[in-house]
Amino acid sequence: MFENVLLVTDGSPGAARCAEQCAQLAATLRCHLQILHVTAPLPAVQLAADLIEGGEVERRASERAAECLDSAARIAAGHGVRVSTHHVVDARSAIAIVEEARRYGCHLIVMHGHAGEARSLRNVARDVILEGDTPVMVFP
């Protein structure tokens, strides 16, 4: 039933714990794990700094996304789980997550809810649940 699972990561310690639990689940289900990192577009001030610094701010943002994805992929690989990684730049995090789940035919979305930060849970996980039609598992 859950052949393809989307794991959303942001590089936080909670997201790493979520990745560990999701990797164990994926190994048990023998499913393919799509790992997604969503980055908001650079604000105008950062874009101006990028013009001055020659793309340094954008490079650092891309490197941060790659580090987050690589970390989650290593966790999954440690459990023998097949992995694909994806990085999306979009100001609408929840919509981007829902669209990526549809694009890759995911049967489940797994994400860290940042329980200590109710605003994050309310703004992203809640919106993913409301905007999409894919089941969502939220880890505290």
Image (cartoon, rainbow, N blue to C red):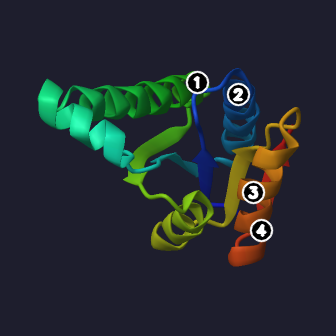
Q: Marks 1 and 3, Cα distance to the nearest angstrom?
A: 27 Å
Circle 3 sits in a helix, a strand or a loop, which is it? helix
Q: Of the residues tagged 2 and 3, which is closer to the observer?
A: 3
Q: Which residue is labeled 2 in the image?
A: 20
Label 2 crowd bin: few (<14), some (14–19), many (20+), radius 10 Å: some
* Residue in the image at 56% along x and 66% along y: 101
Q: What kind of residue is marked 3?
A: Asn
Q: N-terminal of the two: label 2 or label 3?
A: 2
Above or below — where is 8 with respect to 59? below
Task: Tell me, yes or no, whether the two marked residues, 1 and 3, touch with CB atoms within 8 Å.
Answer: no
Identify the image quadrant of residue 135. bottom right
- In depth, the one of 89 and 112 nearer the eye is 89
Task: Tell me, yes or no, whether the two marked residues, 2 and 4, touch with CB atoms within 8 Å.
Answer: no
Q: What kind of residue is marked 1?
A: Ile
Q: What kind of residue is marked 2?
A: Glu
Q: Of the residues tagged 1 and 3, which is closer to the observer?
A: 3
Q: Which residue is labeled 3 in the image?
A: 123
Q: What kind of residue is marked 4?
A: Ile
Above or below — where is 38 with respect to 126? above
Q: Which residue is labeled 1 in the image?
A: 75
Above or below — where is 94 with respect to 52? below
